[in-house]
Image (cartoon, rainbow, N blue to C red):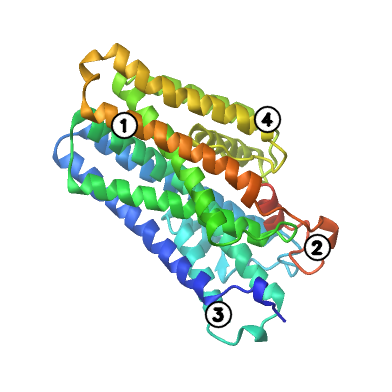
Amino acid sequence: MSQPGTQYTKLRWLLTIVGLILYVIDIWTDIGLALKYFHEKHFVWSGLTVGFVVAGLLVTQIFSHAWYRDDMNDKQINPEGKTTISGMSKVGLAFLHLFGMGIFTRYYHLLNQGSKVVWTKMNSYPVQVHQNLFCLATDLSMLKLLEAFLESVPQLLLQLYIVMGHNECSVVQYISMACSFFNIAWALVDYRRCLRRSLRHINEMPSGLPTIVYLLYKLCTITSLILSYVLLLMLSVYSTVALTVLWLLGTIWTHTLKTNFCSSGGLEILYRAVIGVILTFTFFNVKGQDTKVAMILYYLFHFVVNITAPLLLALLKPELQTATSLLTVSGLIFGVSVLGLVCLVVYYLKLHPRGKLREADEVDGLRKGTESTRRIRNFLHP
C-alpha cells in the first residue's frame, strides 16, 4: 500500500498538463516570431530562431527514442523480450520520433497511466505503481531540461540581443521571451523535484521555501549571465567565438569526467556536447559527485563575467555610457547576480534536503541495474 509521501497525486498529474501547455506555447510563440522576422526580411534572425527550436526538438527526439529502445532491450524492464513498449513497436517508435512526437508520446503515456491511478482510490495501488509514474515523469523532465537549454535559453539570449542591440521591439518578442523564461523556470524546478523523488536514497525536495530559494538561485544566476552575454554581443558579434570556447571547455570538462549516461559511444558524445551548452549558462553536477570546489570556481568566473561585460561595453563604446538602458541592465546584472549567489549559499547551507538513506536500504524502489535507474542516476545532479 502506498504511503502519503510516496504517491503520485492529482496535483502532480495536473501540473504535468501545465508543463505540457507551457512547452507548446513556448515553441509556437518562437515559430510565430521566426515567421515575423522572415516577413520583415530579417533572414538571419529568422533562421537562428528556427534553428534553436529545431535543435531542441531534434536532440530530445534522439534521446527519447534511445531511451525507449534501451527500456525495450533491458531484460529486467522487459523480461519477456517483447518487441513493443507502451504499446508501440520499434517501427512505430521511430516513426513518432521522426516527426517530433517523442515528448508528446511521453506526455500521453504519463497522463494516461497517471489518470488511472490518481482519479481512483490511491490506496488501491502499491508503492511500485506510483514509483513507476515518478520514473516516467523523471524521463520526461530530463528531456524538458535538455530542451530548455537548447531552445529556450539561447532563444532568450537572441531575443534580448535583438531588443537591446537593434531596438527591435514588438509584442510578439516580449511574449516569446516571457514564454521562454517561464519554460526555463518550470523545467528547472520540475527536473529538480522529479529527480529527487525518483531516487529512493535521496530525500524528496520540500515544497515552499526550499523550492522558491532554489528557483531564485538558478533563475537569477542564469538571467545575469544571459544579460552579460547580451552586452558582450552588443560590443561585438565576434563574442560568439568566446561563447563557443566556453561551450568547448564545458564539453571537454564533461569528457574528462568520463560520463557514463548513454548506452552507445555516439550518443555519449552528443550528451557531453549538450552538457557543454548547459554549463555555458549554469552549473550542474555532471556525475553526482562532490563538486564544491568546481562550483565555487564556476561561480567566481560567473561573477567576473557579470562585472566585466558592463565595464567593457562602457569603456569601448562610450556613446552608451549614459544610456539609460545600459545603466539599468548593468544594475540588473549586478543585483540579480548577488541575489542568485546569496540564494545559492542559503540553499546549500540551510535548505538542501540531505539524503539519509543508503543504497543498501533500497528494497522496495526501482530495481537497481535497470536502464531506467541507471539513466536517472547518471544524469545531471543540481
Do we see residue 127 in this rendering? yes
> At x 40% / y 52%, what residue is drawn?
183
Q: Nearer the viewer, residue 176 or 368?
A: 176
CA gap between label 2 and label 4 equals 30 Å
How would you rate the neighbour count of disc 2 (Cα within 10 Å): few for under 14, some for 14-19, many for 20 or more?
Answer: some
> Mark 4 or mark 3: which is in front?
4
CA gap between label 1 and label 2 equals 49 Å
Look at label 3 and name its amino acid.
Val
Residue under pointer 1? 329
How would you rate the neighbour count of disc 3 (Cα within 10 Å): few for under 14, some for 14-19, many for 20 or more?
Answer: many
Q: Residue lying furthest right in this view?
A: 360
> Mark 1 or mark 2: which is in front?
1
Q: Position of residue 47 (x, y in %)?
A: 28, 36
CA gap between label 4 and label 1 equals 30 Å
Which mark is drawn over residue 293?
A: 4
State if disc 3 and disc 1 touch (CB < 8 Å).
no
Residue under pointer 3? 118
User: Judging from the image, what secondary structure is the residue with disc 2 in?
Assistant: loop
> At x 64% / y 39%, what residue is drawn?
286
Residue under pointer 2? 362
User: Judging from the image, what secondary structure is the residue with disc 4 in?
Assistant: helix
Q: In this view, does 100 lie to the left or right of 143?
A: left
**Which of marks 3 and 2 precedes in the sequence?**
3
CA gap between label 2 and label 3 equals 25 Å
Residue 117 vertical placement versus 200 (above, below):
below
**Which of marks 4 and 2 precedes in the sequence?**
4
> Mark 2 or mark 4: which is in front?
4
CA gap between label 1 and label 3 equals 46 Å
